[in-house]
Amino acid sequence: MYRNAIIISMETIMKTVKVSPKFQVVIPHQIRKSLGIKPGTKVHVLQYEDRIEYIPVKKAKQMRGFLKGINTTVKREKDRI
């Protein structure tokens, strides 16, 4: 299933891909499948230090509830209450 892949953890898969002469990159099938990326899916592209990251764009409706259960008890400064 993960031929020619480095599995760093159960959530992290690293594959090597080649940049085409038109600077295009094919996202490997396993990664597309796990992230639900289909033709036409928009992604944010950002440079972070010495790497490139692709982040699938999700509609606000899809993001509903993704912070459910987050711990919101943080120590606040007196003037921020």
Image (cartoon, grey):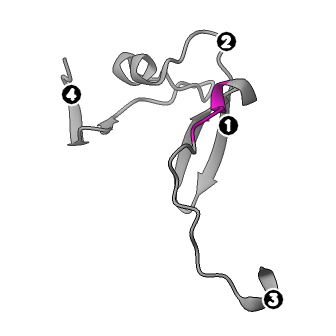
Q: Residue 30, image x and y in percent?
A: 34, 20
Quick check: 75 above or below 8? below
Instruction: Please give the residue where the numbered disc 3 appears in the rendered image.
Output: 79
Instruction: Please give the residue where the numbered disc 2 appears in the rendered image.
Output: 40
- Nearer to us of marks 3 and 2 is 3
Mark on residue 44? 1
Crowd class of label 3 (few under 14; some 14 to 19; many from 20; radius 10 Å): few
Could you tell me if the residues under marks 3 and 2 are in contact, i.e. CB atoms within 8 Å? no
Residue at the image position 67 percent from the left and 12 percent from the top? 40
Kind of residue at badge 2: Gly
Quadrant of the drawing holding the N terminus: top left
Quick check: 23 above or below 72? above
Q: Return the disc, 2 or 4, that comes first in the chain's sequence.
A: 4
Measure the C-alpha gap from mark 2 to mark 4: 26 Å
Label 3: state its secondary structure.
helix
Pick whichever, 12 or 63, lies toward us.
63
Crowd class of label 2 (few under 14; some 14 to 19; many from 20; radius 10 Å): few
Measure the C-alpha gap from mark 1 to mark 2: 13 Å
Q: Residue 80, image x and y in percent?
A: 79, 82
Task: Please check the rendered image and state whether residue 26 is part of the magenta-colored stretch, yes or no.
Answer: no
